[in-house]
């Protein structure tokens, strides 16, 4: 049945005059029983019974009988006595539905549910504040968060954002490195400083080290003193041949190291202090680089080292060359240029950016009226460096030599000379690179 509100004259919705009730009464005398629906058989009505004067208890009850204006009520859950009345109770009885399922939906209003749940949630939990806003019917959840890159507030009641944690860690986290200094004591020695057995000079940060003597760990401040960063002083003198090991912890900022999972770079020096230090490369360490004391670095395989080299030729005649004058040969067609160090369009010069000794060679062919003398020379940085053939009545010149280049600004060019009886000289060029060409190759790096 639909919800039915029974209207009463006493306080509009009061069902009875509570002054006549006795404790443990289970019958209710309503003001006007005529408005209450008739009871037939087991067709009972569920109702809400509210005792509002002494408490706010609300119970679901069932009307089981009616005699005139008197209604008999029991608890809906277990058919027992609905309540114990007091003389000052005000009771509201409202018929709402035929079934308990209906009454759950109809009698308990949204506001009642919100008030009940709100009371359960109203309070502060760890790192979250939960409250019920009766004004808008919402449950408010508030998590205390600080977005603070330097964590300056040092709050114990706030959570940090991912961004602030990352910023703080990137700025503050350090990686620890450990340096071992090994000393062999002389008789009665107490102070250990300077170069150790491996010629490494002692340096540490006070408080960031530990010391062992013949394998036993010593206690800082009791067994030894280490305060100045350059020496360790034993409380009791060592005996001859005692082994003192000093383990010094150092730090460097994580910001100086990038991409540890891939490429790795260090902002400052990286030292391998062992005279036989080995760097292993490859998943199976198939390539190794070993330090050989006072000699150099040894590879287990021949290193693959980029070697700058080029070859260019004159692909057409260079005409109008002045008689009896050293003139730059414009080798304008590259046969190869592994590193792009040769300029074949403007200056016709080789400027390698790797320092070392370079082997060079050049050939120039000539034509002209009655050539009496030819010559060729390699110029370094604009000045004659090495002369080649200087022949009479020859139509070809060659030059070969070795030149040291600084790997930055040094460059070499080829100049040629021809003396003719009249007119100008022509440097012979052709698509065939055999006639007039210039080449250079790195021999030794420096």
Image (tube, rainbow, N blue to C red):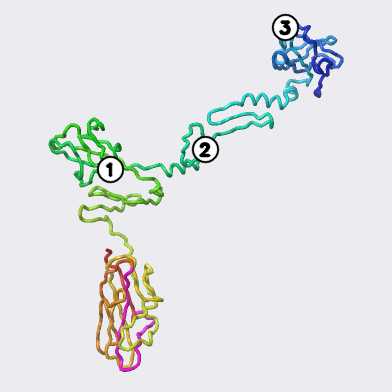
Magenta segment range? Answer: 409-435
Q: What element carries label 3?
A: loop
Q: What element carries label 1?
A: strand
Residue name at image x 22 percent, y 38 percent = 232
**Front residue of this view, candidates 52 and 379:** 52
Q: Report the residue that reaches farthest toward the right.
A: 34
Circle 3 residues within 10 Å: few <14, some 14–19, many ≥20: few
Q: Which mark is residue 146?
A: 2
In this view, the mark in front (1 or 2): 2
Q: Position of residue 125 (x, y in %)?
A: 55, 27
| Mark earlier in primary sequence (1, 2) | 2
Q: Residue 165 carries which label?
A: none
Q: Quadrant of residue 321?
A: bottom left
Residue 192 vertical placement versus 381 (above, below): above
Residue to which mark 1 is pinned: 179
Q: Which mark is residue 24?
A: 3
């Amino acid at each position: 049945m639909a919800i039915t509100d029974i209207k009463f004259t006493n306080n509009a919705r009061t069902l009875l005059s509570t002054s006549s009730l006795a404790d443990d009464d289970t019958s209710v005398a309503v003001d006007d029983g005529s408005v209450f629906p008739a009871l037939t058989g087991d067709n009972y009505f569920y109702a809400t019974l509210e005792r509002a004067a002494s408490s706010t208890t609300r119970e679901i009850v069932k009307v089981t009988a009616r005699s005139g204006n008197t209604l008999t009520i029991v608890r809906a859950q277990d058919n027992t006595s609905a309540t114990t009345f007091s003389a000052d109770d005000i009771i509201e009885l409202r018929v709402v539905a035929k079934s308990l399922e209906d009454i759950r939906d109809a009698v308990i209003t949204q506001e009642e549910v919100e008030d009940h749940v709100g009371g359960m949630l109203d309070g502060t939990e760890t790192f979250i504040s939960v409250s019920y806003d009766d004004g808008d019917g919402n449950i408010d959840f508030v998590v205390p968060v600080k977005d603070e890159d330097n964590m300056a507030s040092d709050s114990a009641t706030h959570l940090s954002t991912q961004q602030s944690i990352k910023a703080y860690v990137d700025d503050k986290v350090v990686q620890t490195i450990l340096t071992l200094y090994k000393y062999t004591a002389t008789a009665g020695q107490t102070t250990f400083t300077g170069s150790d057995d491996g010629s490494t000079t002692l340096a540490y940060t006070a408080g960031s080290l530990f010391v062992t003597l013949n394998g036993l760990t010593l206690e800082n401040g009791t067994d030894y003193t280490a305060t100045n960063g350059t020496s360790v002083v034993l409380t009791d003198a060592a005996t001859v041949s005692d082994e003192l090991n000093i383990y010094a912890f150092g730090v460097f900022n994580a910001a100086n190291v990038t991409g540890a999972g891939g490429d790795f770079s260090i902002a400052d020096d990286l030292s391998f202090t062992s005279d036989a230090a080995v760097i292993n490369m490859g998943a199976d360490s198939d390539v190794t680089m070993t330090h050989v004391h006072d000699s150099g670095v040894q590879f287990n395989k021949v290193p693959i080292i980029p070697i700058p080299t080029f070859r260019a030729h004159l692909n057409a005649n260079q005409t109008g060359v002045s008689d009896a004058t050293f003139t730059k040969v414009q080798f304008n067609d590259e046969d190869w240029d592994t590193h792009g160090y040769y300029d074949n369009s403007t200056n016709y010069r080789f400027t390698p950016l790797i320092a070392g000794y370079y082997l060079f060679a050049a050939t120039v062919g000539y034509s002209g009226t009655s050539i009496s003398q030819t010559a060729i020379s390699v110029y370094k940085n604009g000045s004659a460096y090495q002369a080649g053939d200087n022949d009479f009545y020859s139509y070809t010149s060659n030059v070969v030599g070795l030149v040291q280049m600084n790997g930055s600004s040094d460059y070499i060019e080829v100049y040629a000379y021809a003396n003719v009886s009249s007119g100008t000289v022509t440097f012979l060029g052709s698509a065939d690179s055999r006639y007039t060409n210039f080449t250079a190759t790195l021999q030794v790096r420096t």
